[in-house]
Image (spheres, grey):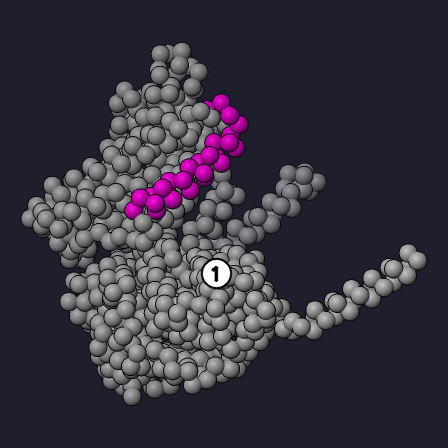
Amino acid sequence: MNRKLIMILTCVFVIAFAFSIQAEVKDPIGVVKLGPGEPVHIAYWVVISGPNTSLGTDVVRGIEIAVDDFGGSIKGFPLKISGQDAACSAEGGQAAATRLAADPTIVAAIGSTCSSAAKPGVPILWKAGIPTVSPSNTAPFLTDPERGDGYGGYARTCHNDKVQGAIAAEFAFREKGLKSAATIHDGSVYAEQLAQVFAKRFKELGGKVTSMEAVSPNDTDMRPVLTKIATAKPDIIYYPIFIAEGGFITRQSKEISGLEKTTMMGADGMFSPDFYKAAGMAAVGMYHSSPDFGAFAGGYQAFLAKHMKKYGEKPIAPFHGHAYDATMMILKAIDKVAVKEGGNLHIGRKALRDALLATSTMQGLTGTITCDQYGDCADPKIAIYQTAAENVKQGAMPTKPYWKPY
Amino acid sequence: MFQRIRERISPTDVVMWLIGGGLLFLVVWGSIATLIKGTYTARHWIDFIIFGLAQGSVYALIATGYTMVYGVLRMINFAHGEVFMSGPYTAYFVAAWFYRTGWLDTNPISCLAAIFLVSMSVSVTIAFFLERIAYRPLRGAPRLIPLITAIGASFFLQYLFRGLYGSSFQAYPDIAMLEGHWVIWGIRILKFQAVVIVAAIVLMFALYSFVMKSRIGKAIRSVSEDKEASALMGIDVDKMISMTFVVGGAAAGAAGVLYAIMFKQVHFFMGFIPGIKAFTAAVLGGIGNIPGAMLGGIFLGLVESVGPSLFLDGLGIVAPYQLKDAIAFTMLVMVLIFRPTGILGERLAVKKA
């Protein structure tokens, strides 16, 4: 009798179990299950400490405005946004990604700011089934077909530096007629690859690259390396690095004999009022390559108005629009794959990733978002900006491009 | 006889000498190759040396703090980098205020003096309380314990200042008087670098004569020789240890302003790298020895500035300035292997080991 009972009970359980599985959303990686009233949790991992804080703050503001615009809930479930500091380094990225990966409630992530943080961080997140969309990692490596399996959950709404570096080189050679160039990077994935793309394109155009130098991220005395560069008297120094070191180089370049006539040019990583604080009046006259705000879609003006109202100032770095688009992309993808069952919400992790990478012709602030299979989603419009004395005095980035390639 | 030689020289020694000799060979070879190639003219070398002297004199001033504390307490005060940071970071707000009111342009010298004063007094206060709160209660503890406390104090101070002044950086205003350059005997020298070098030399001289000539200096030296005997001679040992921290803090605070004049940016983490470099300098010169620390600092600054161009460039290494820190720390390792007492450290080490 006892045995029979056990048999029957087992059968009942097995059948019940089978049915319960049948009823749920299936996903090869995993499913996030939310009970009634539980929030849909999205986390950002950006730089919120150190000299590059403005880059991360700008992104967080873009995310917050996007969440406001979306209405704050998905299928009746509230949205929850949390954040980690990924610094702007490999160590910071790894630490932040590990913390996010340990939280099973996180559905998707936004970040990181710097490519150096994304390189170790993205595989950690994707191993935990968390796809991430970056608003500002521009290093070509991250969407390279040879990048490895760990980056399957990665997409970005900003440009690939293959575009930015080439446009910078074309501006220097064709528009300004500069024939020789030196580059400086700081060993980060972003700076090193961008400097390489620039140098390659500059050589293809017929220019001469006199030297490709590097500094380390915590260097303060750039005068020796600038003196070394000055021995070859290049027409332009392209240094696509970050705010603190960029400030040192810009200031100290004015003190080196032999660099009086050299054009200085940086990139989007130091296109921020904080850079003007670091570089002072030495920044006047230099160039930056950065996204063309004028080419952003019609909704951008409304975004700027909301930004002004909410934070009391203009955007402080170039990536707020990309962050807005990244957030919208994630929210729309969740909306597409989330299944409501009874009072619960089920989100398949692989399904979400597939939906993210399937994003196509989405009208974003920065243009039309269409992802390729490796996660490059932007429709990059890069322009060149020149810094005027007023920009430094008022601590505001120039808004009108100096030159654009189209 | 062969047996005896083999007994005296262990295989480790042979490997060490090979590594040392190999590095020396690379340095010489690289230097010769660079000089033959002739990319750099004499003017460039002079520039490199001046840059190195300016950077090195800041290291030297910080290094004296490490070395004096080691002299009296036999411990490495790893929070000294934060003592160095606290002064100029606080003085920044004074400098910014002077700039806003326009005084910095009208009477720059008195403003600079005030900035120095604020920076030095903040650093002195931090150093004094650091010793009082973090180190004095552990006076009798095993050597490892104050070392760990020092690291903890270093983190505490960093994040205290991050909490006080924020995590971003601040930039010192430009001082018009120090812009531009002078030409002295045909050598072009940037004004602020000349000021930094001269100020550092004056400060080091003052510090050295204070320690050698004054009564307090004599008492500090006596405490570093033998604490018990000094106490028996009527010297207040605790007070002298406090004085050591005060003098080291003052040097660090002054070095901080010189650093801020050279590099303009200050932030809560700025003490870490100069602190480690100055520690390296102190070990290079012979820890416990004040002239050694000064010499080590200037030597380190020179090697960092001249080295990458001199020997790495000649070896065909691309982007040699990325390896600046590698040179500094390789040098530290080599000194620790071949001359653990440092350049000038022998006399002290024999007496106190």
> SS of the residue at dot 1?
helix
At a point 30% along the width and 78% down the height, the residue shown is A299
User: What secondary structure predominates along the stretch shown in magenta?
Assistant: helix
In the image, residue B196 lies in the stretch drawn in magenta: no
Q: Is residue A3 above or below residue B83?
A: below
Report the number of discs. Answer: 1
Q: In the displayed image of the protein, which residue is found farthest to the right?
A: A1
Q: In the displayed image of the protein, which residue is found farthest to the bottom?
A: A406
At a point 35% along the width and 15% down the height, the residue shown is B235
Which contiguous range is marked in magenta?
B139-165
In the image, residue B164 lies in the stretch drawn in magenta: yes
Q: Picture coordinates of residue A100 (x, y %)?
A: 52, 59
Q: Quadrant of residue A138?
A: bottom left
Q: Quadrant of residue A212?
A: bottom left
Q: Picture coordinates of residue A326 (x, y %)?
A: 42, 73
Quadrant of the snapshot with the N terminus of chain A = bottom right
Does the rendering let one see residue A53? yes
Does the rendering let one see residue B318? no
Q: Nearer the viewer, residue A303 or B332?
A: A303
Residue, disc 1 = A93
Q: Is residue B288 above or below residue A391?
A: above
At a point 45% along the width and 55% down the height, the residue shown is B326
Q: Quadrant of residue B291?
A: top left
Please give left or right for residue B93 compared with residue B152 in the image. left
Please give left or right for residue B28 compared with residue B122 in the image. right
Please give left or right for residue A202 compared with residue A273 in the image. right
Q: Picture coordinates of residue A392 (x, y %)?
A: 19, 64
Q: Is residue A168 above or below residue A120?
A: below
**Dot 1 falls on which chain?**
A
At a point 42% along the width and 19% down the height, the residue shown is B227
